[in-house]
Image (tube, grey):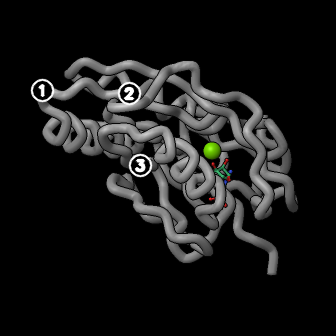
Amino acid sequence: MIENHESWTPYLSRHEIEGIVCRLASRINEDYKGKDLLLIGVLKGASVFMADLFKHLTGQVDADFVRLSSYGREKESSGTITLLKDITADINGRHVLIVEEIIDTGRTLKFLYDRLKSSKPASIEIVTLLDKKEKRLVDVPVKYAGQSVKNEFLIGYGLDLEEKCRNLPDIYYLKYPN
Ligand code: IMP
Ligand code: MG
């Protein structure tokens, strides 16, 4: 399944991921008590995390998705973000929570956050499973971050390398060759 598997090292097991998801969900459940929530997942990477988070949320929760593309080098996003699939929901006056699996430079989420904010939701926040803080180039207000990660390339649990390995239940890392 993973080519050159010797260079891939286990990073987070499915059990550790489950723990992170549960902790995030309990904070979100607390903060949105009595409010209707709309999750907006960023395809394709966030789909696995979104499904797991969704199952742990206890209030009234709806779901929608966007798909964005960022052209650049294989393992890094560029400054040019394109919307490939928009939400179908009207978010005006709603409590929106953007769901991302990992934030790197911040460019993708900054684009989405600004775009959704212009539709005047009642509130808009971001949850990410993983946060590569060291690589941030653009400031984005991340309210819920599951775990900080170093500048390593990760695969599994939705994270891909050239559209492969998203379906691995655990997360692995590849050290950047310097
Ligand atoms: P950003 O715009 O630089 O923040 O890029 C965010 C997007 O890049 C994420 O949603 C992922 O799709 C992708 N990405 C960033 N880091 C990784 C990684 O380590 N593995 C796989 N995809 C990644
Ligand atoms: Mg993503």
- Quadrant of the rendered structure where residue 6 is? bottom right
Q: Rate crowding at label 1 as few (under 14), some (14 to 19) or many (20 or more) other CA atoms within 10 Å.
A: few
Q: Give whichever of 159, 96 is nearer the camera.
A: 96
Give how far apart the Cα atoms at labels 2 and 1 are: 13 Å
Where disc 2 sits, the SS reads: strand
Three-letter code for the amino acid on which mark 1 is drawn: Gly
Q: Position of residue 103 (x, y in %)?
A: 56, 57
Q: Give whichever of 154, 76 is nearer the camera.
A: 76
Q: Give whichever of 39, 4 is nearer the camera.
A: 39
Residue at point 68% right, 34% down?
Answer: 67
Residue 18 appears in the rendering:
no
Is residue 22 depicted above or below 108 in this figure?
Answer: above
Q: Residue tagged by mark 1?
A: 34
Three-letter code for the amino acid on which mark 2 is drawn: Leu
Q: Residue tagged by mark 2?
A: 38
Q: Rate crowding at label 3 as few (under 14), some (14 to 19) or many (20 or more) other CA atoms within 10 Å.
A: some
- Ligand 2 within 8 Å of disc 1? The answer is no
56 lies left or right of 174: left
Q: Quadrant of the N terminus?
A: top right
Is residue 133 depicted above or below 115 in this figure?
Answer: below
Q: Residue tagged by mark 3?
A: 126
Where disc 1 sits, the SS reads: loop
- Quadrant of the rendered structure where residue 176 is? bottom right
Q: Position of residue 40 (x, y in %)?
A: 49, 32
- Ligand 1 within 8 Å of disc 3? The answer is no
Residue at point 70% right, 54% down?
Answer: 8
Q: Position of residue 22 (x, y in %)?
A: 27, 37
Where disc 3 sits, the SS reads: strand
Give how far apart the Cα atoms at labels 3 and 1 are: 19 Å
